[in-house]
Amino acid sequence: MTQYPRGEYGQDVRPGVDAARLWAGGVATAVVAALVAFVGLLIARGLFDVPVLAPKGDGIWGNASTTTYTIAAALAALLATGLMHLLSVATPAPGQFFGWIMVLVTLIAVVLPLTLTVERSAKIATAAINLVIGLVIALVVSSMAANARTLHRHKTGRREPPPPTRQQPPSSYYDS
């Protein structure tokens, strides 16, 4: 059993999470992840003329897959926020577990497109975009979760403060 420090008057001090701040940061992370996905697709299609997630005739703006990809990136950020919230309230080292899970999920997202039967350039571009999205989500969620950590005080028992001590007059007072 984990021992938490005691506050004044019998309070346990336990780590916690400010859920409102965590989820506000999660929504902001979702917007950032969606924009990273969109910019990645624009760079791949516009600068390198790689047809990532869309037929070549769709141009740099792509098709419905662009919208789907950006929404998927935003949902991944929200799922990561939910995971971090769960880990923060249920595990002793949420940052370590979150880091490992995010590394492995990002690795899957990078390797998966490399196994598809599409052009090599599309495989590499998709893997690179997925890598950047995964890194951004992992770093931003970890950072904002650290800022959303709090200390909760729980009373464990009623303990009254000690009574004030009475001051004794100086010993020379009685000697005269």
Image (cartoon, helix red, strand yellow):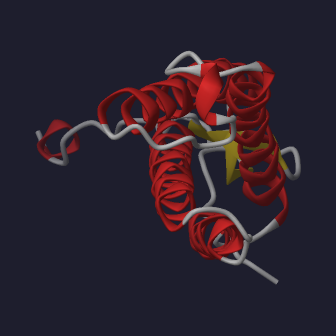
Q: Observer-nearest residue: 70 or 95? A: 70
x and y percentages locating residue 112 in the rendered image: 71, 71
Q: Pick the residue in front: 80 or 50.
A: 50
Q: Is residue 144 left or right of residue 53?
A: left
Residue 131, image x and y in percent? 49, 58
Question: Residue 11's spot in the image, x, y percent?
Answer: 72, 48
Screen quadrant of the C terminus:
top left
Q: Quarter holding the N terminus?
A: bottom right
- On screen, residue 60 above or below 99: above
Residue 125 can be seen in this image: yes
Q: Which of 61/89 is in front?
A: 61
View extreme (bottom): residue? 1
Depicted 12 relative to depicted 143: above or below: below
Depth check: give the residue in front, 13 or 101: 101
Q: Is residue 17 left or right of residue 40?
A: right
Q: Residue at x 86, y 52 (%)?
A: 156
Image quadrant in which you'd find residue 57:
top right
- In this view of the protein, can residue 159 be seen by the observer? no
The quadrant holding residue 77 is: top right
Q: Residue at x 59, y 43 (%)?
A: 52
Q: Is residue 62 left or right of residue 176?
A: right
| Residue occupying the far front of the picture | 57
Residue for point 79% across, 20% down: 64
Q: Is residue 100 above or below residue 95?
A: below
Place of residue 61 in the rendered image (x, y in percent of width and height, measured from the top left): 56, 15
